[in-house]
Amino acid sequence: MTTLTISDRALQSLDLSAIVAPIDRWSLTDPKQFNLDLKLTIDYNRDPQDPRELSEIPEVRLWFIRADARYPYLPLLLDWQAGELARYVAMLVPHQFSRKDGIEYNPEALEIWVMHRVFLLTDWMQKYSIDDRTRLKFMTQMLGYELDDGLFELLESPVEGN
C-alpha cells in the first residue's frame, strides 16, 4: 500500500502534486498492473466542532473532482480493502450517511457514475491493450452492480463510420 497525504494547502489550491508522481510513474511503467493500492490521507484543517464529513466539505470534494478529471482510472488504483473506493465515490456522487448502514449513495447518481466509469475505463483499457476486465467488474460489484460480459462485447465492437 502507498499512502499519499493531501495537505490543506493542496486542497485549497487544487494542487494534485501529491498524486502526480506515483500515478504518472505507474502509467509509464506498467498500466496493466493495478497494484498501487493507494490510500489518500486528507489533512484538512477544520474547527473541531465542525460535524461535516470530509465529503461534505466543498474544497475537499472539488480537489477530488479535479483528480478524477485528470486520472479517471484512479478508482482502479485505490486500496479498496481500506475503504478508499467507497470514500472516493462519496466525493463524487451525492449521498447521505446512515449510522446503521454507512454511506447511502443517491441510487440514480451512482448508476450514472458507474456506467460512465465503465464506458470510460473500457475505452482506456482498450487503448493500453488491457484485456482483463476483472478489476473493473469487481469495482462495480463493490458498488452493487453486476456487469454481464455482453456489455463489454458491445462496447468493444467496432463503431460504424470509424
Image: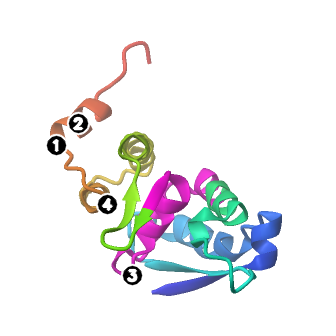
Mark 4: give few (<14), some (14-19) or many (20+) Cα within 10 Å.
some
Q: Is residue 21 left or right of residue 93?
A: right
Residue 151 horizontal/vertical position (percent)? 23, 36
How far is the residue under mark 2 from the one under mark 1?
Answer: 6 Å
How far is the residue under mark 2 from the one under mark 3?
Answer: 29 Å
Name above or below for residue 112 compared with residue 15: above
Which residue is at a point 64% across and 60% down the rendered structure image?
61
How far is the residue under mark 1 from the one under mark 4?
Answer: 14 Å
> What amino acid type should be assigned to the residue bearing mark 4?
Met
How far is the residue under mark 1 from the one under mark 3?
Answer: 27 Å
Assign the C terminus to one quadrant of the image: top left
State the residue in front, 98 or 56. Answer: 98
Q: Is residue 4 left or right of residue 16?
A: left
Which residue is at a point 60% across and 82% down the rendered structure image?
4
Label located before the other in sequence (2 or 3):
3
Label located before the other in sequence (1 or 4):
4
Label located before the other in sequence (3 or 4):
3
Question: What element does badge 1 sit on?
Answer: loop
Question: Principal SS element in the magenta part?
Answer: helix
Residue 87 horizontal/vertical position (percent)? 47, 69
Assign the N terminus to one quadrant of the image: bottom left
Mark 2: give few (<14), some (14-19) or many (20+) Cα within 10 Å.
few
Q: Which residues are magenta?
A: 67-96
Instruction: Identify the mark at residue 82; answer none if there is no mark.
Output: 3
Question: What element does badge 4 sit on?
Answer: helix
> What amino acid type should be assigned to the residue bearing mark 2?
Leu
Q: Which residue is mark 4?
A: 139
Mark 1: give few (<14), some (14-19) or many (20+) Cα within 10 Å.
few
How far is the residue under mark 3 from the one under mark 4?
Answer: 14 Å
Instruction: Identify the mark at residue 151; answer none if there is no mark.
Output: 2
In contact (CB < 8 Å): disc 2 and disc 1 = yes
